[in-house]
Image: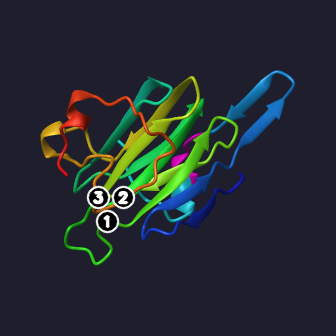
Amino acid sequence: MSSLKVRNSNLENVLIIEPATIYEDFRGSYVETYNEDLYQEAGIDIKFVQDDVSTSAKNVLRGIHGDAETYKLISCPYGRIYLVIVNCDTQSKNFGQWESFSLSAPSKTQILAPPKHGVAHLVLSDVALFSYKQSTYYNRAGQFSYRYDDSRFGIFWPTRTPILSERDSHAEG
């Protein structure tokens, strides 16, 4: 059994994960996106209870959303996204720190975002799939939301004209 390649990001408790099993040939590719034993061997002992996928078109920006309890294991199995993780723990000395990641089908990279961190993504390709495993069941009432352009964060976004939902257009900040 192969092992995962796990490294720390610049944000505390945010991990960058390269899947252990990737097979590619003339027909396409195969990726094992989750294997509980391998994740536990790598020190990631989180029980995931729900999987979610969103499909979006180019320039759609979703987020910044999160809650105080949920870990999210994020990937982009189709297309390309610009992912931003923000420390939204108002009690943390690192509140407002953020990091961006480029996720795509060819890269196969995953990002593990801890609780109290907001997640947002911008679709860079014509269409993209945003896939994530959650350690809790979805509870919109328990979530926080910040505007993508909240001045406290100063996030760089590679677009001037994002397509936003009603929720994201009216988020805090």
Membership of 34 in magenta stretch: yes
Nearest the eye: 44 or 10: 10
Q: Residue at x 37, y 67 (%)?
A: 97
Q: Which mark is residue 151?
A: 3
Q: Is residue 10 above or below residue 31?
A: below
Please, what secondary structure does the residue beneath circle 3 have? Answer: loop
* x then y, percent, for residue 66: 27, 49
What's the colour scheme?
Answer: rainbow
Q: Is residue 11 above or below residue 19?
A: below
Q: Which residue is mark 1?
A: 96
> Dot 3, how many residues are within 10 Å of its Cα: few (below 14), some (14-19), or many (20+)?
few
Q: Which mark is residue 86?
A: 2
Amino acid carrying mark 1 in the image = Gly
Residue 168 falls in image quadrant:
top left
Marks 2, 3: nearer the viewer: 3
Membership of 104 in magenta stretch: no
* x then y, percent, for residue 148: 33, 46
Q: Which mark is residue 84?
A: none
Q: Which residues are magenta?
A: 33-38
Left or right position of 101 against 63: right
Between the residue at mark 1 and the residue at mark 3, the CA separation in whole angstroms equals 10 Å
Q: Residue at x 37, y 60 (%)?
A: 154
Please, what secondary structure does the residue beneath circle 1 have? Answer: loop
Left or right position of 18 against 111: right
* x then y, percent, for residue 9: 53, 66
Q: Is residue 126 above or below residue 81?
A: above
